[in-house]
Image (spheres, rainbow, N blue to C red):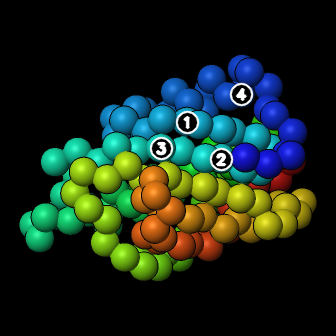
């Protein structure tokens, strides 16, 4: 995924035990310092009334990647904001890949770019996110 350093195995296990990620069936492909890559096989219950993947599922996939990336430093971080743009509808049974990548990490705020695409590389969503670390 990148040349970013790996994280401690105990931290990776903690991140991968995220209950919401497990409920959705999200697979953690790679978690490194400031980065995360995920995979999700869409299921029929993840579709909206029009038959396309629900925006909330796409957002959740991006958000789980963001949460893993911003907490990969080993210090608790929470989201301050996430702005997502939906670029294209994915087919109902698609496999989606999400990636979060740190743009800049300051003392208390971190800035991230998030992307969601189909397995064949078609862009589905793009997002910008800001994380906050409480006082050290």
The disc at residue 39 is 3
The one nearer the camera, 60 or 117, is 117
Helix, strand or loop under label 3: strand
Structural distance between the alpha carbons of marks 2 and 3: 10 Å
Structural distance between the alpha carbons of marks 3 and 4: 19 Å
Where does label 2 land, which residue?
36
- The residue located at (24%, 51%) in the rendering is 93
Query: Badge 3, how many Cα within 10 Å: few under 14, some, many 20+?
Result: many
Is disc 1 in contact with disc 4, using a CB cutoff of under 8 Å?
no
In the displayed structure, would residue 104 be above or below residue 36? below
- The residue located at (63%, 23%) in the rendering is 13
**Residue farthest top in this picture:** 10
Residue 81 visible from this viewpoint: no
Give the image quarter of residue 75: top right
Structural distance between the alpha carbons of marks 2 and 1: 8 Å
Mark 4 vs mark 2: which is more N-terminal? 4
Residue 58 in the image: state x and y as whole percent: 39, 60
Give the image quarter of residue 76: top right
The disc at residue 28 is 1
The one nearer the camera, 1 or 114, is 1
Structural distance between the alpha carbons of marks 1 and 4: 13 Å
Query: Badge 2, how many Cα within 10 Å: few under 14, some, many 20+?
Result: many
Is disc 2 in contact with disc 1, using a CB cutoff of under 8 Å?
yes
Mark 2 vs mark 1: which is more N-terminal? 1
Mark 1 vs mark 4: which is more N-terminal? 4
Structural distance between the alpha carbons of marks 3 and 1: 7 Å
């Amino acid at each position: 995924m990148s040349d970013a350093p790996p994280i401690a195995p105990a931290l990776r296990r903690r991140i991968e035990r995220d209950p919401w990620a497990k409920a959705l069936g999200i697979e953690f492909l790679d978690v490194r310092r400031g980065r995360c890559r995920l995979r999700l096989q869409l299921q029929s219950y993840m579709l909206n009334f029009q038959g396309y993947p629900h925006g909330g599922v796409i957002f959740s996939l991006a958000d789980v990647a963001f949460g893993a990336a911003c907490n990969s430093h080993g210090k608790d971080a929470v989201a301050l904001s996430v702005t997502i743009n939906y670029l294209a509808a994915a087919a109902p049974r698609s496999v989606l890949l999400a990636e979060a990548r740190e743009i800049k990490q300051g003392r208390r705020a971190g800035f991230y770019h998030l992307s969601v695409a189909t397995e064949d590389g078609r862009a589905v969503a793009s997002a910008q996110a800001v994380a906050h670390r409480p006082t050290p």
